[in-house]
């Protein structure tokens, strides 16, 4: 019994190896190795429950490393919340791996390898919307630093994860059975994907005549709302804005002003003066007519009514408290915000008009991890614009992974992305996922450059998750046929 239990350290170790494809490691080739080893080893699990448990431990190892940044917000107020950090990382890792467990258990009668491939694929899809959803650290995001990431433009993030596991299963099975022709076919498919990805990755980037200024004040989370320091960070942004050349759009990060918008008339006047009439987007908290608190992006234009976008997908525990009555008794309610109440979600995806031929789709921080939000607008934007406060995520993996997710969104849609981050990493990303220019983490400064052109609408942008469902059902049918004949 002890040796059997110790055996589950093997899939945990493989899960850790799998996670090394994520930033800041970016060792995606080791992720391929981990997948192949797991496919090979899981065949030893014969019983349905053992197969599902094996995959669950594979997930636990994976999520503990992938989501290590989740402890960082609890260290902002160390004395009050640090004790929660270990519970947070283990509980969320187990919760995410339970998706893998349940769905792999469903497909285990088809065989251990099919349970791994189909179970993880559909589990990754379900965890993207179950409750409010948490699609951070998807299998696809392991390969953002590789040429293979360009396949996101065709199959999307969930289809990509399924494709990788399916090809690796095909290769491992072909090698084990010494079927040279099938092995060659698998390697040919993989190499074709690689060379196509290289070609698309190296497309010449064209630029529009629209210019943008991204401002990064570098306000640490522990100091951001300090009454004495908040004006200092605000004045940094004012200075960068006033000293800038004439651009088409100026962007400040999430919650850039230190008063709610309803009480910040003087601050807004300073912003308008510094921008000299140039349209400026900035993040602010605000109260609506029902006195509900919202996290918003405001576009301020000379002599025009403000355009406002309210964040529609909120962060559990950060912006609203699930099971609030129970958890507030544990002292967690103060984590939501300084006003002692949760935020209210906005009405959903929207486009904001800078001028008649320049529209952007706003995203506020956490919203960027949801691929579906970029397909929910009435028309395609010229730019995806994210404002964020990655100071919550620490300095190790969180901000880098968040940036990788933005690269995914650019590749998936063929639309360039710009992001203004409070402490970094602010960047402009081309429509094929290449970082044009960026400001390093933990630095103060600004970026001024032309916006890259969008590419034609991608297959994934046009078809969405229909591609994933076609792939999934086709593989499931293939698995059933294989099961009946062997």
Image (cartoon, rainbow, N blue to C red):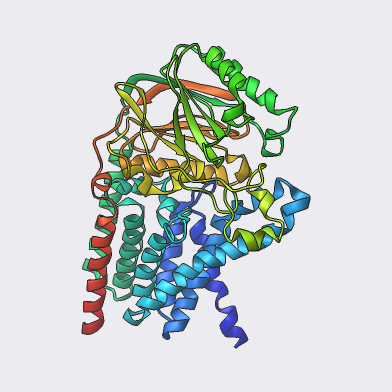
Whole-percent x, y for residue 127 in the image: 44, 61
Which of the image's four quarters has the N terminus? bottom right
Q: Does residue 92 sit above or below 368 in this rendering?
A: below
The residue at the point 78 percent across, 51 percent down is: 79
In-front residue for pair 115/468:
468
In the rendering, at what x and y percent does residue 196 appear?
Answer: 26, 45
Residues 375 and 266: in front is 266
Viewer can see residue 118: yes
State the image coordinates of residue 29 (x, y, percent, origin top left): 44, 54
Where, by quadrant of the figure, is residue 471 drawn?
A: bottom left
Instruction: Say which residue appears at 55% left-offset and 76% top-offset.
Output: 8
| In the displayed structure image, the side of residue 392 where residue 109 appears, left or right | left
For residue 371, above or below residue 200: below
Residue lying at the far bottom in this picture: please name it: 1
Q: Please identify the quarter of the rendering in which residue 268 is found.
A: top right
- Quarter of the rendering occupied by the C terminus: bottom left
Q: Residue at x 56, y 45 (%)?
A: 343
In the rendered view, would you say 273 is above or below 67?
above
Q: Is residue 108 left or right of residue 342?
A: left
Q: Return the residue nearer the eye: 400 or 457.
A: 457
The one of 28 and 85 positioned closer to us in this rendering: 85
- Where residue 401 appears, as percent x and y from the top left, is 51, 46
- When the figure is inspected, residue 27 is found, relative to residue 473, above or below; the finding is above
């Amino acid at each position: 019994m002890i040796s059997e239990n110790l055996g589950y350290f093997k899939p945990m170790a493989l899960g850790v190896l799998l996670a090394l494809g994520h930033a800041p490691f970016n060792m995606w080739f080791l992720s391929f190795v981990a997948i192949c080893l797991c496919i090979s080893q899981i065949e030893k699990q014969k019983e349905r429950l053992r197969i599902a448990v094996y995959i669950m431990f594979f997930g636990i190892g994976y999520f503990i490393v992938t989501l290590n940044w989740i402890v960082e917000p609890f260290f902002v107020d160390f004395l009050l919340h640090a004790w929660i950090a270990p519970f947070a990382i283990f509980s969320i890792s187990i919760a995410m791996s339970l998706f893998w467990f349940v769905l792999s258990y469903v497909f285990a009668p088809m065989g251990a390898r099919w349970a791994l491939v189909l179970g993880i694929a559909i589990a990754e899809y379900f965890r993207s919307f179950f409750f409010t959803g948490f699609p951070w650290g998807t299998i696809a995001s392991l390969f953002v630093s590789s040429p293979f990431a360009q396949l996101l433009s065709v199959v999307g993030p969930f289809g990509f994860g399924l494709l990788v596991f399916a090809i690796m299963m095909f290769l491992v099975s072909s090698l084990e059975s010494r079927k040279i022709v099938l092995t060659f076919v698998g390697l040919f498919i993989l190499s074709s994907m690689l060379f196509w990805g290289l070609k698309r990755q190296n497309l010449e980037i064209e630029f529009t005549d629209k210019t943008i200024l991204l401002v990064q004040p570098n306000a640490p989370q522990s100091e951001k709302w300090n009454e004495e320091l908040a004006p200092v960070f605000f004045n940094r942004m004012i200075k960068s804005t006033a000293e800038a050349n004439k651009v088409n759009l100026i962007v400040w990060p999430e919650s850039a002003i230190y008063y709610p918008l309803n009480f910040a008339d003087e601050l807004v006047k300073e912003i308008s003066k510094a921008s000299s009439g140039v349209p400026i987007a900035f993040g602010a908290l605000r109260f609506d007519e029902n006195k509900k608190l919202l996290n918003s992006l405001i576009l301020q234009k000379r002599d025009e009514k403000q355009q406002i976008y309210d964040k529609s997908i909120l962060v559990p525990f950060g912006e609203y408290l699930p099971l609030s009555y129970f958890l507030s008794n544990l002292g967690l309610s103060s984590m939501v915000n300084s006003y002692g109440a949760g935020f209210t979600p906005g009405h959903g995806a929207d486009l904001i008009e800078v001028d008649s031929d320049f529209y952007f789709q706003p995203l506020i921080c956490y919203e960027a991890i949801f691929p579906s939000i970029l397909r929910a607008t009435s028309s395609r934007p010229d730019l995806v614009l994210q404002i964020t406060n990655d100071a919550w995520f620490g300095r190790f993996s969180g901000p880098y992974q968040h940036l990788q997710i933005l690269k995914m969104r650019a590749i998936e849609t063929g639309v360039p992305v710009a992001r203004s981050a409070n402490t970094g990493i602010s960047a402009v990303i081309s429509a094929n996922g290449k970082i044009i220019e960026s400001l390093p983490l933990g630095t103060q400064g600004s970026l001024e450059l032309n916006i890259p052109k969008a590419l034609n609408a991608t297959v994934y942008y046009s078809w969405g998750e229909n591609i994933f469902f076609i792939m999934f059902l086709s593989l499931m049918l293939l698995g059933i046929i294989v099961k009946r004949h062997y």
